[in-house]
Image (cartoon, grey):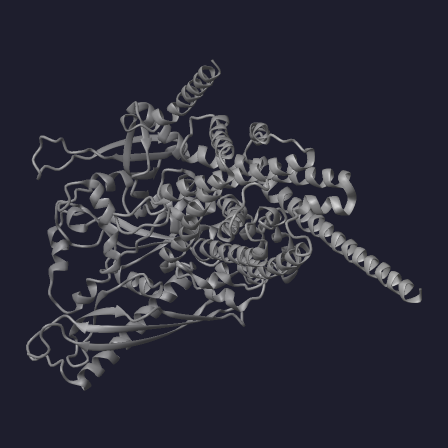
Amino acid sequence: MQKTKIGTVEAIMLILTIIVAHSVLSMPTNILNTYKSASILNVTYVSIIAIIIAYFVYKLLKPFPCMDIIDISELVGGKFFKNVVGSIFIIYFIVSSSFMLRSFSESIQILYFPMTDITFIISLIIIAICIANRLDFSSTIKTNVIILPIALIGVLFLFFTNINRFVPERIFPILGESAFNTFVLGITNLSSFGGIAYIYFLPPLLKENTKLKKITLISIIATSLYLIFTIAVLLFIFTFFTDVSEISPLYTATRYIEFGSFFQRLESVFLLVWILVFACYLSIVCKFSTGIFQKVTGISNKKALIDIFGLLILGIALIPKNLAISQNFEYKVYPYLMIGIVLVLGIGILIFANISKKKQIHNINTNNNHFREELQNE
Amino acid sequence: MNKLVKNIFIFVVILVFISAFSSSYSSLNIDNLTYVLAIGIDSSSDNKLEVSFHFSNPIPAESSASEKSTPIINTVVASSLSNAINLVNGYQGRQLNLSHCKVIIFSEEIASKGISDEIYTLINDTQIRPSANIIVSKCNAKYYMNQIQPEIENLLSRYYEVFADSSKYVGHMPNATIGDFFNSLICKTCEPYAILGGINKANSKTNSSEASDFGDNSNNNSQKDYNIKANDSSVEGENKVENIGVAVFKGDKLVGELNALETMAFLSIRNKVDRFLVSVPDPLNENEYLDIYLTPKGSSSVSVDTSTNSPYVKVKCKFTAQIYSMSENSKYLSSDILETISNSCNTYLESMFLDYLYKSSKDFKSDINGFGNFAAKNFITTSGFEQYNWLETYKDSFFDVNIETSVKSGMLISET
């Protein structure tokens, strides 16, 4: 895991990949269905909280340069605690990405391969990520740096090409269902910022550890802007997303782009970009999961793990009997998993680590003072 | 040996994937598809649907350029739209592909009963484009399709592609699409609408005296020209269909129709027209009318007061205008005269807009203008807005229209 070092832009793109991959699925619909006309207000409010949390995470990671959360958890609770935390993060990464893969593959099957079994569609993506992971991690990262800007520009393109259809009044009633729903229950929408989880594992991977602050803040601010643009496109143009669940609302939005009779059916281009982004996302998940596993178990050959983790993702992705189960996971389970593991457990470990480090420093200082006093007395 | 096994494994995997994906490829292969250009939906007995499919018929390569494709229409009676598609799939021996379907036509009869099931089914279809136009035909949908014989276009698909573009510069019909219809159907702040289609009077009636009424050049008929709907115009030609006016829906049911003049008011309020021609009373010559090209200046401004149970809607529109009709002794270089014509325009348009708005409110009880979006501004929460029940309260609305027209000049000639 420590072998491949990544630069600042690559790290920012890596974190942004998570939101782009999630936004292609039903995440925007979940936000619009829950917060209705207050969706943009909620996303803005949650974004501010996410930026504060990300800064807090950076502050907590700062005293432990070149250490990820697995190393820090070993400092806090020893090897056993390190294994527990590592396992929890592996389960979180693998399970969430598997269900996302299932939803994404279901969408592709409905749209383009109605006669093909879902197993083959998922397998094809799994083979792609296994091959990518067998190569150096930098191949995934570099592909990501090329593809992700296209996906980001795509959302801006979607926003500006549909601007003549915008009805900005759809932001009203301003508080949506209620202030309680938007601001208190709306906190669960922090789960949209799944990229925070990857910040915990970045320090040992960075070429320049001093850039962690820049990476953390820029990536979370960019995630916020991306999310606001995505929700704005869907809310201002389409009324039906607040009441109807679509398999992929962004895909539906792209079907409305037309420039006369010449430029039509651009959704295929968007889908191609999203497939590549999704492959990069799974590749990153696979890389981090195998890295954590290697750290926990101490296995020296990581390549053997890639196929096992690929098969694990494939197996879990095939568990849901239908799209409803995988979408229910996205809507009902994933937000609580993300908040519980990434925000509560992750930040909790960092706080404990910081407290124990301060105590250690305090103890060392106290001992030093005692030693000095004894020396002076002598 | 190890490398050989690996290569064989890769080869087998590639073969498996090729066979797995080939079934999807075969089903979407162009040789196995029939492209539908338009769907017509009529009601039949026993609550069944009579669905007509208009297919593309490419002109054979050896035919001359002027030769036109003859329409191919298949009609089937089925309990649902999806069953109808399936039955025609079997009949044609090919799979119907709706990805090039440009128009969906509903007969007036079925539209009055409600078309939400058909709209939801079509939107659920991955092939139907949201940009497909939706027409409510005053006659049978199948008959309407049969009468489409574009004179200018050789390809029927081209006609379907461009016919709705005239909404931007004529203003006699909206460019209503199924995507917008579905959006409005679900919306709690507006109601759906569609293009009103029919067969023109000159073709549908043999009574020449009735048709000749429209050829009269008297000034009153200058106004009559705009009070037409589909089925009313006197245009004669090979293409017998015409699309004039708006089919107004309340929920999924057709509740009324707008004529050409009302359609212009509707499109102006919704900012969906670039330029249109109207006849306004000539302030300088009593009983005479001036034909004026109006161009909206910016977006219309709407405010809704919901402090009482009777919403008070204020609409403000600005236009720049150019005088199109010209006669002897026309003097359009005088500021005073242009000012007088502007005032006449304002008075005429205000009355025209008010007539339209009260018709939509009192007669149709349907907010196709989307005023509900502006009414929602007055509420903090969705529950408050839902309690106000905008779509039902709209019928009690009062309107105030303010028009500011600035007549600039004539066109090439300013004085005669």
Q: Position of residue A286 (x, y in %)?
A: 56, 36
Question: Most extreme residue toward the front, as rendered?
Answer: A378
State the image quarter where residue A179 is shown.
Answer: bottom right
In terms of depth relative to the viewer, which is nearer, B95 or B280? B95
Q: Residue furthest top?
A: B1
> Against A294, is B131 above or below?
below
- Left or right relative to A346: residue A131: left
Residue B108 in picture, x, y percent from top left: 33, 46
Viewer-closest of B58 and B389: B58
Work out which quarter of the rendered image holds the C terminus of chain A and state it: bottom right
Q: Nearer the viewer, residue A64 or B374?
A: A64
Seen at 11% across and 65% down, the residue is B217
Q: Position of residue B310 (x, y in %)?
A: 50, 69
Vertical arrangement, residue A290 with respect to residue B295, above or below = above
Quarter occupied by the N terminus of chain A: top right
Q: Is residue A284 visible?
A: yes
- Specify the quadrant of the image occupied by residue A360: bottom right
Q: Position of residue A212 (x, y in %)?
A: 58, 55
